[in-house]
Image (spheres, rainbow, N blue to C red):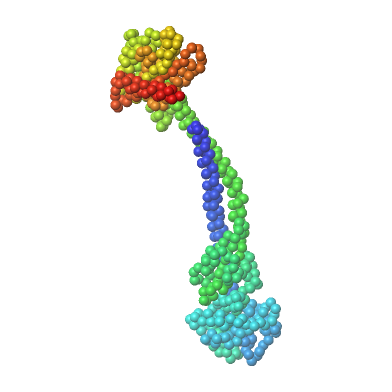
């Protein structure tokens, strides 16, 4: 995979991950902010509901503390009068003051007389069976009051919440009750909620105090704390958000739960605008990544490609390559400078090697049959190469080659054909190995090449090309014989130097080991 392909892959994956992060986490964060803003608005509405509820409570207290109401209450509760609640005058007391229960109790809180009027049907009803028990809950409050104080609480009679007002003294003339408590209760029903909701401009409704259907988290929020009012907000759906208010009775138990729904306008606006925003954002990110890819390709990939093209020619080009252009002052420019320094050193090394070859060409170091160096020339030039290798701290390899079937060729076709086989082998050696390598016919059917490579990879590549050329020659059939070689290799390490004779001896030994393996394989075949 090329650098450009990797760059395209990395940028593509990065873009997809970035888009996924924006779509999942970015949308979630923004949606959470929208929800917080909507909750803030709902909590403001909740505060307004509580304020209006307390105002309704205070107004009910004011209605029932007047002297005229006290007189009417005393008359209604007087057993001696036994006034019927069906009469227009008595019913108007309940209707005008919007109350459902009127009662009196002695200073200890024991109910002496109580009557309940159904404002919907217009007739009297039985007082709730738990009226006395629920009133007993407010004894601790009543006992702390001075004779002139009154107070109000929320109590649930037979599971129906009532707004209850207690006036500490009942002395309206002309009654004979004396000191005691006047108790007035107003049912918190649909009419009450509708009236309060109309004032608050909210669709208020009353929920069961068991909070059936509410999530556990909302129940826990409403039941937390000990204040009279506790509140909670919950998103019902993508379109609706609810506000909840719970009112406790004096015993701390839920007596009333109110709720209202509000449209999620901000959420609807967010959902409509998110698609457009995400599309524009993704387009911008895509454009930015494309521009980044173009810039990276121009500033990095293209320059590295030029460097790679120059470095690729170093092994095959014996002439001095042109300098790598140095652009800017970044790391790639530093690499170009280093490569130029390496090319300069390589040029100097090649020049020194050419000078050495030219000096020795005038000597009688050439094999007359093949035109390759003879043993003397090989050893002489090989020593110089070892000296260069030691100075430059570079590794080298010596290749020893031996024809496997020269005696057979001589015996079958004659020595002239045997000489032709040696010449053909020399031509293949010349075509495969570099002109700067020392190629020699050591004598008879033995050849040597030095140095053939500085690395194992280069060594394998050179041997592969040599055997491929031999196979091509044999397949061509231009000569009546086939060529076959056994080879041995010895490496030179400048950290552990050796002589050219040592290298030659080691390579020769490894060549005979290969020849012996071939013979054993042929015998088994």
Q: Is residue 141 left or right of residue 117?
A: left
Vertical position of residue 167 compared to residue 357: above or below: below
As rendered, which of 275 and 66 lies closer to the eye? 275
User: In the picture, residue 511 is in which quadrant?
Assistant: top left
As rendered, which of 392 and 115 lies closer to the eye? 392
Q: In this rendering, does residue 231 appear at all? A: no
- Residue 499: image location, x then y, percent: 29, 20
**Residue at the image position 61 percent from the left and 54 percent from the top:** 268
Vertical position of residue 194 compared to residue 136: above or below: above
- Residue 203: image location, x then y, percent: 63, 65
Name of the residue lying farthest toward the front: 524
User: In the picture, residue 95 is in which quadrant?
Assistant: bottom right
**Residue at the image position 41 percent from the left and 24 percent from the top:** 520
As rendered, which of 252 and 490 lies closer to the eye? 490
- Residue 270: image location, x then y, percent: 59, 52
The quarter in which the C terminus is drawn is top left
Q: Is residue 325 left or right of residue 179?
A: left
**Residue at the image position 62 percent from the left and 67 percent from the top:** 204
Q: Is residue 346 left or right of residue 472?
A: left
- Residue 15: image location, x then y, percent: 53, 41
Vertical position of residue 482 compared to residue 91: above or below: above
As rendered, which of 181 and 19 lies closer to the eye? 19
**Residue at the image position 53 percent from the left and 80 percent from the top:** 137
Q: In this rendering, does residue 252 appear at all? A: yes
Question: What is the tally of numbered marks visible in this picture?
Answer: 0
């Amino acid at each position: 995979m090329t650098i450009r392909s990797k760059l395209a892959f990395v940028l593509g994956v990065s873009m997809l991950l970035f888009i996924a992060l924006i779509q999942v986490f970015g949308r979630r964060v923004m949606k959470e902010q929208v929800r917080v803003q909507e909750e803030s608005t709902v909590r403001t509405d909740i505060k307004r509901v509580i304020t209006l509820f307390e105002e309704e409570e205070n107004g009910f207290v004011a209605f029932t503390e007047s002297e005229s109401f006290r007189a009417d209450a005393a008359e209604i509760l007087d057993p001696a009068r036994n006034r019927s609640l069906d009469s227009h005058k008595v019913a108007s007391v309940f209707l005008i003051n919007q109350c459902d229960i009127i009662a009196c109790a002695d200073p200890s809180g024991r109910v002496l007389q109580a009557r309940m009027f159904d404002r919907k049907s217009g007739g009297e009803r039985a007082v709730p069976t738990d009226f006395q028990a629920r009133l007993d809950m407010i004894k601790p409050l009543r006992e702390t009051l001075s004779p002139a104080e009154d107070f109000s609480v929320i109590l649930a009679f037979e599971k129906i919440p009532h707004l209850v007002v207690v006036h500490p003294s009942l002395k309206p003339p002309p009654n004979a009750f004396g000191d005691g408590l006047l108790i007035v209760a107003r049912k918190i029903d649909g009419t009450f909620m509708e009236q309060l909701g109309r004032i608050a401009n909210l669709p208020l409704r009353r929920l069961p105090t068991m909070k059936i259907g509410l999530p556990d988290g909302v129940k826990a929020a409403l039941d937390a704390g000990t204040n009279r009012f506790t509140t909670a907000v919950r998103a019902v759906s993508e379109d609706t958000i609810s506000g909840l208010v719970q009112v406790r009775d004096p015993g701390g138990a839920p007596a009333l739960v109110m709720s209202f729904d509000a449209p999620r306008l901000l959420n609807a606006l967010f959902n409509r605008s998110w698609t457009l925003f995400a599309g524009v954002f993704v387009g911008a990110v895509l454009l930015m990544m494309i521009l980044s890819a173009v810039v990276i390709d121009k500033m990095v990939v293209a320059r590295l490609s030029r460097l790679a093209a120059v470095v690729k020619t170093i092994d095959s080009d014996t002439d001095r390559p042109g300098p790598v252009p140095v652009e800017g002052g970044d790391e790639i420019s530093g690499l170009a400078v280093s490569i130029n320094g390496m090319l300069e050193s390589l040029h100097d090394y090649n020049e020194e090697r050419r000078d050495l070859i030219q000096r020795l060409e005038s000597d009688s170091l050439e094999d007359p049959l093949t035109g390759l160096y003879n043993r003397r020339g090989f050893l002489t030039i090989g020593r110089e190469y070892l000296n260069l290798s030691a100075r430059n701290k570079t590794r080298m390899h010596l290749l020893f080659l031996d024809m496997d079937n020269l005696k057979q060729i001589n015996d079958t076709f004659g020595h002239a054909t045997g000489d032709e086989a040696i010449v053909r082998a020399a031509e293949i050696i010349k075509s495969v190995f570099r002109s700067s390598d020392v190629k020699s016919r050591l004598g008879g059917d033995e050849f040597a090449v030095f140095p053939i490579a500085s690395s194992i990879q280069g060594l394998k590549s050179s041997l592969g090309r040599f055997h491929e050329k031999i196979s091509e020659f044999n397949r061509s059939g231009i000569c009546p014989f086939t060529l076959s070689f056994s080879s041995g290799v010895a490496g030179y390490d400048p950290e552990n130097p050796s002589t050219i004779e040592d290298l030659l001896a080691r390579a020769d030994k490894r060549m005979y080991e290969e020849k012996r393996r071939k013979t054993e394989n042929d015998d088994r075949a």
